[in-house]
Image (cartoon, rainbow, N blue to C red):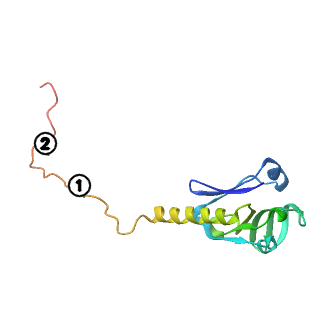
Amino acid sequence: MARLAVRGEELIVELTWWEKITARHSDVRVPLAAVEKVTVERDWRRALRGEPSRGVWIGDLLQLGVREQADVRDFVAIRPRRGPVARVDLRPEASPFARIAVSDRVPQTTADGIRTAVSQHLLTAAGPRGADPGPVPRRRPAWLPGRSPAPAPPAGI
């Protein structure tokens, strides 16, 4: 069963080997900076939009692959009988997909984990506010010993 995972600065939809074959797609990787909103959909149908493009679409059994609507592409890995769906809306300019929807046994925990990873990523990317950059190194004046503007004589003379 597909699952959402955060590795480093990426959100990854990890697919099993048979899901990769069925969806004709490898694991989906998007940068955490592309994540706009993470929600949990109780009804799996609300996570779907557009028309099936490539993948497998078997009614209430399996929804797996890419869906398209106008210029928007979504990736879904939904097993309707498994319960709620974790839905991740993405910034379209930063990702090939606008939405990712994945069935999850504990979707609320997964969504919370992604939200935490995104907020931590944003904090580290922006840097802490009001942080002290540390002491500014002082330059030694040229007249102090060891700071002669003239080159040192060669060794052994």
Quadrant of residue 128 in the image? bottom left
Location of residue 58 (image quadrant):
bottom right
The amino acid type found where label 2 is placed reads Gly
Amino acid type shown at disc 1: Pro
* Quarter of the figure that contains the C terminus: top left
Q: 127 and 51: which one is in front?
A: 127
Q: For mark 2, does the 10 Å Cα neighbourhood hold few (<14), some (14 to 19), or many (20 or more) residues?
A: few
Q: Residue furthest top?
A: 156
**Residue 149, above or below 45:** above
Find residue 145 and report its horizontal and vertical position in percent. 9, 43
The 10 Å Cα crowd at callout 1, few under 14, some 14 to 19, many 20 or more, is: few
Q: The N terminus lies in which quarter of the figure? A: bottom right
Q: In this view, does 105 lie to the left or right of 79?
A: left
SS class of the residue under badge 1?
A: loop
CA gap, disc 1 and disc 2: 17 Å
| Residue indicated by mark 1 | 137
Residue 154 in the image, given as x and y percentages of width and height: 16, 30
**Residue at 56% across, 64% down:** 116
Judging by the rendered image, the residue that carries numbered circle 2 is: 146
